[in-house]
């Protein structure tokens, strides 16, 4: 496979070919067909919840909802579910919680995830749940342009987190797989130089780190053609993506998942006009207003928070789970033939802060900082005091610079002016070398609380 065609922004041989869709029946159906498929699955799921979930029977009862079916068209009548709610269910009846809807002996795979307090919680899967995750993930990664003739190095560890489920997906697609744990840059670079893979699955932070190392050494590696990013915001930020592509020569797009829903749930096709929803028939997605949480129509230009309901989950189904991502829905024909809605993440709700009444997402700051490469590495974070959401200007921002570089007062001033011009608030930039930035290169937290 050759490097991406910079004129078209697509992979040669992997363009948005309408014949290259994994699950054509589901991925090309219109809204009415998707709703009919969803309603049929939801009727069975509702019975499963009413019979087996003490957690949801109680929540629905508290909301005045009885045992009669609430259809998907009326699902906004049901209460929303938060990460904190699920953590409480686990704490009430460990290890699997009051929302475990199958006998424990049917649980055949357990992943761990961080709870709202930072203590681990668990995600239980039956064989049917494993298959459901694999089905959705296969659609997602096939959409991104990964097919059976590719050789894929994945830096997503096999556990304890759900990203490791990607190996089931790659096996289903039929790719050559080069497994590797998170953050082992030397081994990734060795494999890249040796030409044993053409596609890399990683976080945007780690992709930036690899690009910075190659750029610092003046190295050009021709074997890498495609980088699929996930696990954090960044792969859809043009300044971040463009830098990675300019150094590696690889085509960059992104995927996204939610641990409590499915590890791979959205995939961006080579047309690169937003990520396609891949959960049809298994997950129902809604858009809600980020403040009022009132339902919104999923239509081009709409901005809100996505909430998800399982339609076929057996062990740990969730209803109207708030994913925590603020997204913008994209419209128009991207050319790939899929009819599912597309979106781009604006930022994580948990990372959002307010400056004089205006909501700000650190990913927007990251996009500004990325313009100053190679004088900066591309990593940056906002410093916040405790749990305070409101931040008074000047907003403290830490920006990473390469080891050996000096904390240039001119660079600091340039970044501050760029943030002010782009985001309309004053900031105070502190330049910190890589060795002092204090985080691993694999994944970057966009805020630091003091």
Image (cartoon, rainbow, N blue to C red):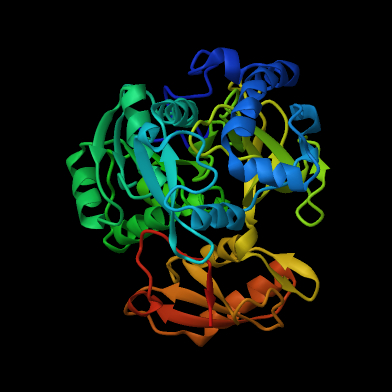
Relative placement, left or right, of 125 versus 340 is: left
Frontmost residue, 32 versus 200:
32
Frontmost residue, 421 versus 294:
294
Q: From what the image shows, is residue 366 above or below residue 321?
A: below
Q: Which residue is painted at 81% across and 32% down in the image?
A: 74
Relative placement, left or right, of 293 versus 362 is: right
Q: Which x, y percent locates residue 171?
A: 31, 26
Q: From what the image shows, is residue 198 above or below residue 259?
A: above
Q: From what the image shows, is residue 345 above or below residue 399?
A: above
Q: From what the image shows, is residue 107 above or below residue 245?
A: above
The number of discs equals: 0
Relative placement, left or right, of 307 versus 366 is: right
Relative placement, left or right, of 433 versus 143 is: left
Q: Which residue is painted at 82% across and 47% down in the image?
A: 294
Q: Which residue is painted at 78% across and 38% down in the image?
A: 65
Residue 268 image-quadrant placement = top right
Q: Is residue 300 visible?
A: no
Q: Which x, y percent locates residue 443?
A: 41, 60
Residue 427 image-quadrant placement = bottom right
Query: Which quadrant of the rendered structure holds the N terminus?
Result: top left
Q: Is residue 52 visible?
A: yes
Q: Which x, y percent locates residue 90?
A: 50, 53
Q: Which x, y percent locates residue 226?
A: 39, 38
Q: Which residue is painted at 43% across and 34% down in the image?
A: 103
């Amino acid at each position: 496979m050759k490097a991406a065609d910079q004129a078209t922004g697509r992979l040669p041989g992997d363009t948005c070919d309408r014949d290259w869709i994994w699950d054509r029946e589901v991925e090309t159906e219109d809204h009415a067909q998707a709703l009919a498929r969803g309603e049929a699955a939801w009727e069975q799921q509702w019975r499963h919840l009413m019979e087996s979930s003490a957690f949801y029977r109680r929540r629905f009862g508290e909301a005045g909802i009885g045992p009669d079916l609430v259809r998907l068209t009326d699902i906004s009548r049901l209460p929303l579910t938060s990460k904190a709610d699920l953590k409480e269910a686990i704490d009430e009846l460990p290890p699997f919680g009051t929302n475990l809807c199958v006998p424990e002996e049917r649980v055949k795979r357990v992943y761990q995830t961080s709870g709202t307090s930072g203590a681990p919680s668990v995600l239980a899967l039956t064989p049917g749940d494993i298959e459901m995750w694999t089905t959705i993930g296969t659609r997602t990664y096939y959409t991104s342009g990964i097919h059976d003739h590719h050789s894929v190095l994945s830096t997503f560890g096999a556990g304890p987190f759900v990203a490791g489920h990607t190996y089931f997906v790659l096996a289903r697609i039929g790719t050559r797989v080069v497994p590797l744990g998170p953050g082992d840059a030397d081994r990734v670079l060795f494999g890249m130089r040796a030409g044993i893979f053409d596609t890399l699955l990683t976080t945007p932070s780690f992709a930036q780190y690899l690009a910075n190392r190659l750029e610092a050494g003046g190295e050009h590696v021709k074997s890498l053609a495609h980088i699929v990013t996930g696990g954090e915001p960044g792969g859809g930020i043009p300044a971040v993506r463009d830098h990675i592509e300019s150094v590696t020569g690889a085509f960059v797009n992104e995927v996204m998942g939610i641990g409590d829903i499915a590890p791979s749930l959205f995939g961006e096709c080579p047309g690169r006009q937003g990520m396609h929803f891949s959960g049809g028939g298994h997950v129902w997605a809604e858009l809600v207003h980020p403040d009022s949480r009132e339902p919104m129509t999923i239509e081009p230009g709409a901005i809100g928070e996505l909430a998800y309901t399982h339609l076929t989950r057996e062990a740990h189904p969730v209803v109207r789970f708030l994913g925590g991502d603020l997204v913008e829905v994209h419209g128009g024909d991207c050319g790939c033939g899929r009819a599912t809605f597309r979106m781009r993440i604006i930022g994580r709700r948990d990372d959002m802060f307010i400056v004089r009444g205006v909501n700000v997402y650190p990913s927007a700051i990251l996009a500004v900082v990325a313009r100053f490469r190679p004088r900066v590495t591309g990593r940056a974070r906002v410093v916040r005091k405790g749990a305070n959401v409101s931040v008074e200007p000047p907003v403290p921002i830490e920006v990473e610079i390469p080891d050996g570089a000096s904390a240039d007062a001119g660079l600091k001033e340039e970044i501050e002016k760029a943030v002010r011009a782009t985001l309309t608030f004053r900031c105070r930039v502190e330049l910190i070398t890589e060795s002092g930035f204090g985080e691993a290169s694999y994944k970057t937290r966009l805020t630091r609380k003091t």
